[in-house]
Image: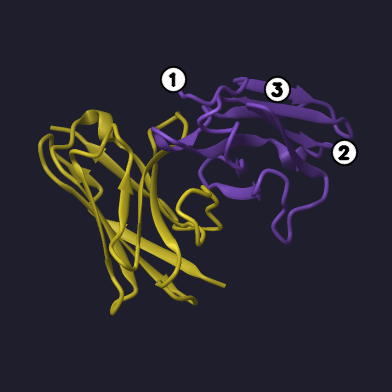
Chain colours: A yellow, B purple
Amino acid sequence: QVHLQQWGAGLLKPSETLSLTCEVSGGSLNFYYWTWIRQPPGKGLEWIGETNHNGRSTYNPSLKSRVTMSVDTSKKQFSLSLNSVTAADTAVYYCARGSLSSTSQTFDSWGQGTLVTVSS
Amino acid sequence: QSVLTQPPSVSGTPGQRVTISCSGSSSNIGSKTVNWYQQIPGTAPKVLIYGTNQRPSGVPDRFSGSKSGTSASLAISGLQSEDEANYYCAVWDDSLKGVFGGGTKLTVL
């Protein structure tokens, strides 16, 4: 049973860079797509993007200019970086395992979520 | 405003059957498979239906998914109090990439 454990800074100031890491245990990083999803307080889910062990990444067009995702197969970790944050980026951020296909939108394992608050 | 439209809320009494709709377009639901997630507030979402109508192991057969044209539906039969949660559809869009519906709050009366 794959398990995702995520961590990162929970309080940022406007214009700073959000950085989150998700570690995979109980399964391989290979072959799957690894995804970041966020949820503003009291609102719905938003897909941020996905990456795989080959470094192939696809991002939400509305966030693409600010997002970078990466994978470290040796540490079985994948990461999210979102620069120039504003209050609108305040949300719970989840990492999740996608499927073997980049277009399936099937996420079968999730991290515990990290609340990131952007405030001056 | 999501490209996938869900009703904000639905309700039902224990034992009833309820359905939650997800309306999209030819660039998403019309040409891709649909997934449904259940989220109890304060917890991470859980996949209920994948591949439009497939249930992961452990998901009761009270939950079923279907699709017709550019709309998809999640049906819950034999409604139980523990089904009270938020439900989201998710699908790939040719232009917008990964998209979620706005979510539907299910209340068990």
In terms of sequence position, does the residue under pointer 2 or pointer 1 come before the other?
Answer: 1
Q: Nearer the viewer, mark 3 or mark 1?
A: 1
Tell if the residue under mark 2 belongs to the same chain as the one under mark 3: yes
Q: Is residue B23 above or below residue A59?
A: above
User: Label 2: which residue?
Assistant: B78
- Residue at point 55% right, 47% down? B45
**Most foreground residue, A8 or A103:** A103
Q: Is residue A68 above or below residue B6?
A: below
Subunit bearing disc 1: B
User: Label 3: which residue?
Assistant: B10
Mark linked to residue B1: 1
Where is the N terminus of chain A found, in terms of image quarters? bottom right
**Most foreground residue, A110 or A57:** A57
In terms of sequence position, does the residue under pointer 3 or pointer 1 come before the other?
Answer: 1
Dot 3: element? strand
Tell if the residue under mark 2 belongs to the same chain as the one under mark 1: yes
In terms of sequence position, does the residue under pointer 2 or pointer 3 come before the other?
Answer: 3
